[in-house]
Image: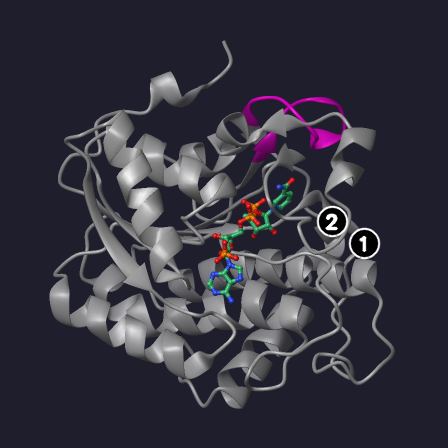
Amino acid sequence: MNWTKENIKSQNGKTVLITGANTGLGFQTALELAKKEALVIVAGRNKIKINAAIENIKKEYPAAKLEAGIVDLSDLSSVETFSKSVLKKHHRLDVLINNAGVMFPPPSTTKEGYELQFGVNFIAHFALTAHLFQLLNATPNSRVVTLSSIAHKNGRIDFENLKLEKPFDKFREYGQSKVADLIFTLELQRRLEKHDLPCISIGAHPGISKTELLRTDNPEMINEFPHMDANQGAFPTLYAATEPLQGGEYIGPNGEGEMTGYPAPAFISDYAQNLEIGKKLWEYANNNMELKFLP
Ligand SMILES: NC(=O)c1ccc[n+]([C@@H]2O[C@H](COP(=O)([O-])OP(=O)(O)OC[C@H]3O[C@@H](n4cnc5c(N)ncnc54)[C@H](OP(=O)(O)O)[C@@H]3O)[C@@H](O)[C@H]2O)c1
């Protein structure tokens, strides 16, 4: 039997924060979790888009419990300010879903100078998780779900090219950001275990799903591949967010090449599992952002 959104159990009483929840996979994830009674913090950088997403969810499910969260992940001061507002307002955070992402933007950097994909997809989510960790840690059975990609397979971390030092290569830089997300998922789990903390870290990827992700490149490119609509594309995230799982699991679609299908354990490259690279990336992020997250 394939797992679908119909299998999601009641999430009543849970608080879930989703980045990039105004459109694409994040929006579908917010919609389905709201329908299952979770309080969903719908986070994104654009207030108008976030409010429109909240209205659209309410049209489908008027009883939805939703809250807007405004955060620009290309600016670490925005991540910190937003995190403080969440810590002030909320007494629990059951699930943090590190979903927002950019793919193939023109060569550009975040406010702090990271290549945009590395900065938004990985660095900002590392910071967000670090800032919100005290809330996750205070919530029984909490978890962090981070979105990676099939593109992680060829991804490598070039510590000499995290700030656009080398000529821009959109495939290489996107792969770098997405393998960083998976390395983060696994290293976070190791550190949670090392510190004997019950929160767990899970990875998920949506295969190939029709969203706005290629908006700054070639949106038609997706038609060259088998793909799913964004609602089905959100199933691995929904499964990762709601099913009883072991920390460190990685969930993706079960079809050929993991491009389409229903949630199942997904392939993790040897590189993403490398202990030395995990430690080095973690220390890089902690040191560069002057964080002391699970040392
Ligand atoms: N679609 C796929 O086939 C696929 C495959 C593998 C992995 N993924 C991953 O899935 C995740 C979701 O992507 P998607 O396909 O749903 O793409 P999408 O439709 O383009 O949605 C991306 C979301 O991220 C937000 N975002 C981008 N930059 C941001 C920033 N600086 N600050 C805050 N929010 C920002 C966007 O907000 P705005 O609307 O305001 O720009 C949007 O809400 C990404 O991590 C992506 O790498 C997707």
Q: Is residue 49 left or right of residue 64?
A: right
Circle 1 sits in a helix, a strand or a loop, which is it? helix
Q: Quadrant of the C terminus?
A: bottom left
Q: What amino acid type is highlighted by mark number 2?
A: Ala
- Is residue 191 or residue 43 the one in the foreground? 43
Q: Which mark is residue 151?
A: 2
Q: Is residue 74 visible?
A: yes
Please check the rendered image and state whether residue 258 is part of the magenta-colored stretch, yes or no.
yes
Q: Compared to 215, does 162 lie above or below? A: below
The answer to which quarter of the image holds residue 277 is bottom right
Please check the rendered image and state whether residue 203 is part of the magenta-colored stretch, yes or no.
no
Question: For the residue with label 2, is its CB less than 8 Å from the closest atom of ligand 1?
Answer: yes
Circle 2 sits in a helix, a strand or a loop, which is it? helix
x and y, in percent, of residue 110 in the image: 58, 78
Give me the residue at 25% from left, 50% from top.
Answer: 94
Q: Which mark is residue 154?
A: 1
The answer to which quarter of the image holds residue 39 is top left
Q: Is residue 293 visible?
A: no
x and y, in percent, of residue 196 in the image: 32, 63
Task: Please state the extent of the stretch shown in magenta in the rendering.
Answer: 252-263
- Is residue 110 or residue 268 the one in the foreground? 110
Q: Is residue 52 left or right of residue 185?
A: left
Tally of numbered discs: 2
Cα distance between the residues tagged 2 and 1? 6 Å
Give me the residue at 30% from left, 72% from top.
Answer: 82
The answer to which quarter of the image holds residue 166 is bottom right
Q: Compared to 24, does 127 lie above or below? A: below
Marks 2/1 in contact by CB < 8 Å: the verdict is yes
